[in-house]
Image (cartoon, grey):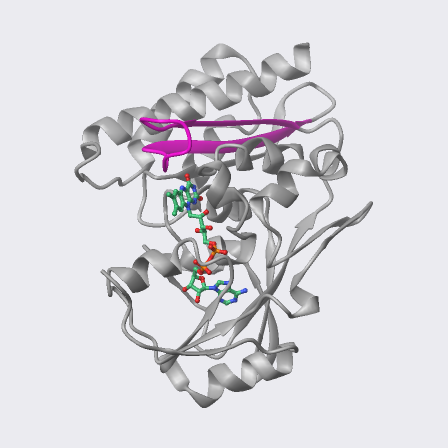
Amino acid sequence: MKPAAFDYAVPATLAEAVALLAQHGGEAKAISGGQSLMPMLNFRLTSPAMLVDLRRISELHGMDIQPAGTRLGARTRWCDIEKSSALAAAQPLLCAAIAHVAHYQVRNRGTVGGSIVHADPAAEMPGLSVALDAQLRLVGAQGERMVPAAEFFTGPLSTVIESDEVLVEVLLPAWPAARRWGFQEFARRRGDYALAGAAVWYDLDSNGSIINAHIAIIGASDRPRRLPTVESVLNGRKPDAASFAAAAQATSAAVDPMTDVHASAEYRRALAGTMVERALSDAAQRAAA
Ligand SMILES: Cc1cc2nc3c(=O)[nH]c(=O)nc-3n(C[C@H](O)[C@H](O)[C@H](O)COP(=O)(O)OP(=O)(O)OC[C@H]3O[C@@H](n4cnc5c(N)ncnc54)[C@H](O)[C@@H]3O)c2cc1C
């Protein structure tokens, strides 16, 4: 099937892009890598009157890695992340998880910003943005605002972004070298969306107990989210097999997955617990190694 007819603009500046989006109200849509939007247009799940191509807008490009944190322009592609050894050192959890996104062809075009705004609950980047306490900079006709990733996602394919807003960049806090982290997901084939996955990290206090536990789940909820009840189970405990098993049990109790053609809710519930347990074990083993 082919998309319905639409107008197409390639603005050179952010101000122009915002003006075009505002002028057309909800009838215009931004396009970045097109890897989610084009299939939706082809299936006529959406039929915007105009596409505003973001590719020429300089503010959306590039990454900047500083001791205080990392900036990813919204047009950063999966393959840009994959090729950056500096980013792998500065944000190891992000880079390990992004290696699971899609296939070579999609990775050459798909972007960080497109994935976050598309807000697929099973996609890696939305889950990572929550796990990593990302701040999202949005610019629209009314000005700019920073939105914490934890407040951005409102449901499957739904976010707080307004129709005239562009996601410009993603800001990630600095990552201490001693931090422990793990990422696990299960998909039927490599590169497919995960049936369930977990991005986890924690720090240790001077007694070797867990503090600051962050447990984020993908594919087992209507949106990417952290699991505060699981984090409370871990904080204050030693990072050992018993703690990780308790976290797995708490995860299965905390998630609310859907049944679909790929897996039942019960299966995803159990899988989410297993993914959290394995990711926590990876974190401990990496530190021991
Ligand atoms: C075969 C296949 C397999 C895939 N597998 C995976 C996978 O395993 N994991 C995964 O995470 N993803 C997967 N994807 C999706 C892929 O990662 C997409 O690239 C990504 O979800 C969307 O990024 P994009 O740049 O292509 O966005 P687009 O398709 O261009 O846009 C997506 C949405 O975001 C909006 N948008 C884009 N950029 C902005 C912006 N800066 N500001 C405001 N709105 C914006 C658009 O209007 C649209 O609504 C797969 C895609 C395909 C085709």
Residue 8: percent from left, percent from top: 45, 77
Quadrant of the snapshot with the N terminus: bottom left
In the rendered image, residue 258, in percent from the top left (x then y), is placed at 22, 41
**Magenta residue check for 287:** no
Indicate the quadrant where residue 138 lies.
bottom right
Relative to 286, 66 lies left or right: right
Residue displayed at 60% across by 42% down: 79
Give the main secondary structure, helix, strand or loop, of the magenta stretch. Answer: strand
Image location (x, y in percent) of residue 109: 53, 51
Residue 262 visible in the snapshot: yes
Residue in view at x 48 percent, y 86 percent: 22
Q: Which residues are magenta?
A: 180-204
Q: Residue at x 74, y 37 (%)?
A: 90
Query: Relative to 180, does residue 53 appear above or below in the rendering?
Result: below
Q: Is residue 141 visible?
A: no
Left or right of 154 on screen, residue 178: right
Magenta span contains residue 188: yes
Residue closest to the eye, 289 or 210: 289
Q: Position of residue 164 (x, y in %)?
A: 48, 79
| Residue 202 as seen in the image, left or right of residue 22 | right
Which residue is drawn at the image coordinates 65% and 64% (left, top)?
Answer: 60
State ligand 1's quadrant: bottom left
